Amino acid sequence: MTAVAAPAGVWVDVVGQEAAVGQFHRAATGVSPLAQAWLITGPPGSGRSTAARAFAAALQCEQGTGCGHCPACRTVLAGTHPDVTVVATDKLSISKDEVRSLVLTAQRAPATGRHRVVIVEDADRMSAGTFNVLLKSIEEPPPATVWMLCAPSAEDLAPTIRSRCRLVTLSIPAAEVVAELLRRRDGVEPELADRAARAAQGHIGLALRYATQDGALTAREEAARTLLGLRSTGQAVLAAQTLVDRATAEAKEHADQVAAEERAHFLRSAGVEDSAVPPALRSQLKALEDDAKRRQTRLVRDVLDRYLLDAHSVLRDVLTRQLGSGSELVNVEVAPEIDRAAGAGSGDLTLGLLEAVHEARARIAGNVPPLLAIEALLGRVAVTLR
Ligand SMILES: [Zn+2]
């Protein structure tokens, strides 16, 4: 007797993750015992939080199946179920106070559902001290409580925490299933969905962005052309500056938007007008603004990391051509430029460049000024591909 989770009901948007869905489905339907702490890992964009929400819905489902249409399933998926708490953060870290309040939430019995579920989307953003606050609650949760921690990899969490969690690992979904999701869920035109999914290389959120944001795919192609057209150190320095400027603008736009929403929300819940903030609330508003600035710093690094992954995919296409493996290119739009670059260098040199991309990413993550790291990388590309 096997319980195979069909890609339906609450699981319909958890694409390309048959093994993980099977594991969740068995636990939610009582086929296997339900662990009270789960660690859901997978690369960015693989759908960790979508998977966690679907699992939470399956746990609360009134049919006990994760039907996807009962009120419990629907409210969990819509984010309005009273017994499912989701912590998402754009901030650099999750504070001790935030985790303390989560632990209190986790202690409460469910109000209407069968379980109390607490989902932490970026559990890797908790500091070591914060892990200790969480530990007790993960070790001995009340009987109806289920924790779901999401992180890029198990190593991102303290060993004390991860050893107490049931681990579920998501894989990078194939471009075809991502394209299918964009068509079905978001109504994206088939050809655009294919292009966006291919460019995003398994990152679902990014694919959606490419498909829906004006000029995003074109900008990516432009960047690929620039990379492959570098011939001199001077050009490399200019291109590095342009990339960093673009990342800063993109991050600022996003951070400003979130900050404005937060400010409006804060003022609304305090019941005051934007034009007349009483002195007593000003320091809290100031704290919100400081938070937004910290977030922007992280966002710039995230955006640059994405650009570097794009550069990596372009150089990997160059290597594909050099090795003559016949695999399909990720960046078919710039195929002529890729062919030229393949002819200008050799597989060994391209491998060196691919390593240099990883090095640049590691340096930026390690707080080297991004401009410096990117200049060094592009300078090397220019010398190699000219
Ligand atoms: Zn249901």
Image (cartoon, rainbow, N blue to C red):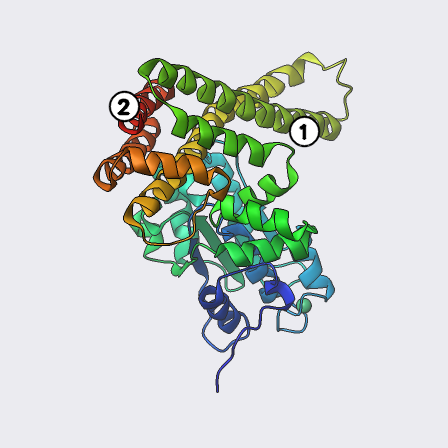
Give the residue type that dot 2 points to.
Answer: Val
Secondary structure of the residue carrying numbered label 1? helix
Q: Is residue 108 visible?
A: no
Q: Residue at coordinates 41% horizontally, 15% vertically from top-left?
A: 238
**208 with respect to 316 (left or right):** right
Give the residue type that dot 1 points to.
Answer: Glu
Q: Position of residue 88 (x, y in %)?
A: 54, 41
Q: Quadrant of residue 359?
A: top left
**49 with respect to 373 (left or right):** right
The CB of the residue at mark 2 lies under 8 Å from ligand 1: no
> Depth check: 271 or 189 in front?
189
Q: Position of residue 204 (x, y in %)?
A: 54, 48
Disc on the earlier residue, 1 or 2: 1
Dot 1: few (<14), some (14–19), or many (≥20) neighbours within 10 Å?
few
Which residue lies under the disc numbered 1?
A: 261
Q: Please state the quadrant of the image where ligand 1 appears.
A: bottom right
Q: Position of residue 187 (x, y in %)?
A: 70, 51
Secondary structure of the residue carrying numbered label 2? helix
Please tell me the numbered disc located at residue 216.
none
**Distance of label 1 from label 2 (alpha carbons):** 46 Å
Which residue lies under the disc numbered 2?
A: 383
Q: Residue at coordinates 42% horizontally, 57% vertically from top-left?
A: 171
